[in-house]
Each structure stands twice: as structure tokens, then as C-alpha cells.
Amino acid sequence: MRLVQRKRESERPLETVSNSLGAVTGSVSQSTLVKAGLVAGALAALTAGSAAISSIRRRMEGSDS
């Protein structure tokens, strides 16, 4: 009987990305995938932050009236 080997929280996204892009990653290293994931995550965070700031500004403009 084999015990289930649990992944650390930091290993789960890497495994998911590796599994999802398995067919595409012929010559792409794991470090390149990690860098691409970090860039995509940073872009998503900047977009969300920008949307939040815009929302706050709209609320403040609406309450001034």
C-alpha cells in the first residue's frame, strides 16, 4: 500500500503548469515556465490594482456630487 505523497503549496502551481503545457514544452525549461508564470501573474495583479483604483476614484467622484 502506497501512502499519498502530498505536494507542498508552492509545488502545486508548478505541477499544474507543467501538466497543462506538457505538449508545448518540448524545448522549454521549467525555469522559463516559472518566469512566464511570474510575468503573467504580475500583469494580472497590475490590471486588478488599476481596476480597483479606478473603482475607488469613481466612487469618490460620485459622492462629491
Image (cartoon, rainbow, N blue to C red):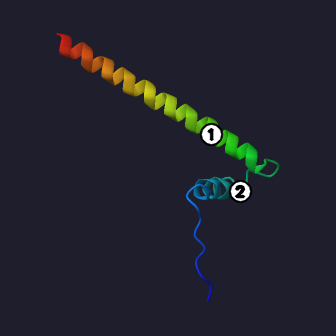
Q: Residue furthest top?
A: 65
Looking at the image, which residue is at 59% across and 65% down?
7
Residue depicted at x 68% and y 55%? 18
Image quadrant where one finds the C terminus: top left
Residue 2 is situated, as x and y percent measured from the top left of the image, at: 62, 84
Q: Secondary structure at mark 2?
A: loop
The answer to whether 26 appears left or right of 38 in the picture is right
Mark 1, Cα crowd under 10 Å, few <14 / some 14-19 / many 20+, is few
Marks 2 and 1 in Cβ contact (< 8 Å):
no
The residues tagged by marks 2 and 1 sit, at their Cα atoms, a distance apart of 18 Å
Say which residue label 2 marks. 22
Q: Amino acid at mark 1?
A: Leu
Is disc 1 placed on a helix, strand or loop?
helix
52 left or right, relative to 8: left
- Tell me which label, 2 or 1, sits earlier in the chain: 2
Residue neighbourhood size for the residue with mark 2, other residues' Cα within 10 Å, grouped as few (<14), some (14–19), many (≥20)? few
Total numbered labels placed on residues in the image: 2
Q: In this picture, is 1 found above or below 44?
A: below
Give the residue at mark 1: 38
Quadrant in the rendering for residue 1:
bottom right
Question: Residue 53 at what x, y percent from top left?
Answer: 38, 22
Q: Residue at x 50, y 33 (%)?
A: 45
Q: Residue at x 33, y 24 (%)?
A: 55
Can you give x and y, in whole percent of width and height, for residue 15 in the image?
64, 58
Q: Nearer the viewer, mark 2 or mark 1?
A: 1
Residue found at the very far right of the displayed protein: 27
Q: Where 17 falls versus 38 (above or below)?
A: below
Residue 34, image x, y percentages: 68, 45
